[in-house]
Image: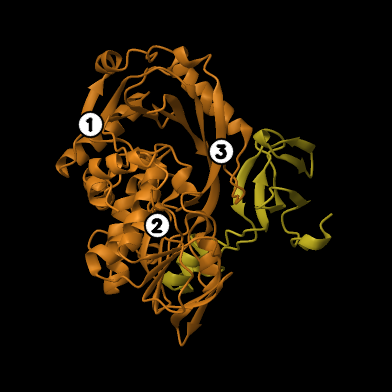
Chain colours: A orange, B yellow
Amino acid sequence: MKYSLLSLARNALSFHEKWPSAWRSPQPQREYDVIVVGGGGHGLASAYYLAREHGIRRVAVLEKGWIGGGNTGRNTTIVRSNYLWDEAAALYEKSLQLWEGLSQALNYNVMFSQRGVYNLGHSLQDMRDIARRVNANRLNGIDGELLDARQVRERIPIMAIDGRYPVLGASFQPRGGVARHDAVAWGFARAADALGVDIIQECEVTGIRRKAGAVTGVDTTRGFIAAPRVGVVAAGHSSVLADMAGLRLPIESHPLQALVSEPLKPVLDTVVMSNAVHGYISQSDKGELVVGSGIDAFTGYAQRGSFSIIEGNLAAIVELFPIFSRVRMLRQWGGIVDVCPDACPIIGKTPVKGLYFNCGWGTGGFKATPGSGWVFAHTLARDEPHPLNAPFGLARFETGALIDEHGAAGVAH
Amino acid sequence: MLQIDCPWCGPRDQSEFGFGGEAHIVRPADPDALSDAEWADYLFMRKNTRGPHAEQWCHSAGCRRWFNVLRDTLTYRILAVYRVGEPPPEPGHAD
């Protein structure tokens, strides 16, 4: 059913009790053309673009939990594309352009709000790095402004720029912002389902079967499912799945935490992030302050992190925003992020024929959801990377052509 | 926060320690003889184990010495602490 004013009015007459399910819950078929392992935003977007852009509709998305239950529903929903290096900037900018038409394309309101993103500078070196990044962005056709302390004070008057962490300036990307993360998962799931993709929840992959160096299918908790091509989009569990195929990845999984406050009246109309003091904050449409933290240094798979990380994070936020010092936090949670040595993703083929990985997004994958799906669908359909993800193959760890985005990724998600 | 039993100082809060990643990665004796793939494997590829994981910690705000810990990455429970150079204990017998 197409969502429209008409469908809203029609369903109002039946007291909104007869809306159909947004997607089916089919039994897995015995065989598919492509299996996508992982029903997060990236996996669903991959399946959606496989069906829409490449006409491959015998696609299954296998999700061990439920749609939107993993990192897609656990992040701080920030979207931006102000990365330093050409390769990363092109990839994230493609994603941002897809975000700009996503609600219309999916016929689902993902509540994409381009309220701008500030990255604060607290030292002279911060400011030099920020100036370099803004200039690099502009050369790549990506919007960016370099602001001094006075301009930051005018635009974010509630921030204490003369406090313990003096703010010397900031970069500002006006087209950045936030989106409703659950809606992104649900919107992609619904749109992929409408194109014939089978979304199979509570179906955990337990093995990757191979024959003569090529993938033949996957063993799951709901039986064997055959497919000549398997794309793994499993974020924090990528190494576990790689191990099933006898592969090793340059990835370590860490817990990353976030938290939200009680709802407040509108007080912060943009996104503020600071690499140096490890904090980022925005206000959701419900009025909650959404605060993101840093990763725990140790590796972990438990979807919870250390309290000391939150303590340091909130101390920094309160120094920057003394007005929030008495706000009560409502909920706190963790997700498992797949951190790559160069803070860039791995998207491409593997030594196993027909097996592809899309992982290593680390702390900042949400913003890339549509772009990641776009290039991964191309990779799965054509058996070769899209020009945008060609530099992001596993081979870069052998050639040494790493793309060091620690500065732009940093804590800033 | 974890409580880590430093082999020299005894149990202390995790905030006194630095995490040093996977343990028992041995630097190749003859790096020149390695292929690019073998060098990449040594430099970047990690087990990233889900379960009992042998890892290095440094008591950086204490005695500043390195040691190894066997920790379950799913429960965060510390199964064993042992010194550098010792083999990792079997997870089942760690207690």
- Kindly identify which numbered label has been placed on residue A23: 2
Q: CA distance from mark 2 to mark 3?
A: 27 Å
| Label 2 vs label 3, nearer the camera | 2
Q: CA distance from mark 1 to mark 2?
A: 34 Å
The residue tagged 1 is A174
CB contact under 8 Å: marks 1 and 3: no
Q: Image height check: is A221 above or below A135?
A: below
Q: Residues within 10 Å of mark 2 (few under 14, many from 20)?
A: some
Label 2 is placed on what type of residue? Answer: Trp
Compare marks 1 and 3 and give the one earlier in the sequence.
1
Q: Residue at x 34, y 26 (%)?
A: A121
Compare marks 1 and 2 and give the one earlier in the sequence.
2
Residue A165 placement, left or right of A135: right
Quarter placement of the C terminus of chain B: bottom right
Q: Residues within 10 Å of mark 1 (few under 14, many from 20)?
A: some
Which one is in front, B33 or A114?
A114
Label 1 is placed on what type of residue? Answer: Pro
For disc 2, the chain is A
| Label 1 vs label 2, nearer the camera | 2
The residue tagged 3 is A333
Q: Image height check: is A37 above or below A139?
A: below
- Dot 3: what SS? strand
Label 3 is placed on what type of residue? Answer: Trp
Q: Residue A401: image x %, image y %? A: 33, 59
Q: Residue at x 67, y 34 (%)?
A: B16
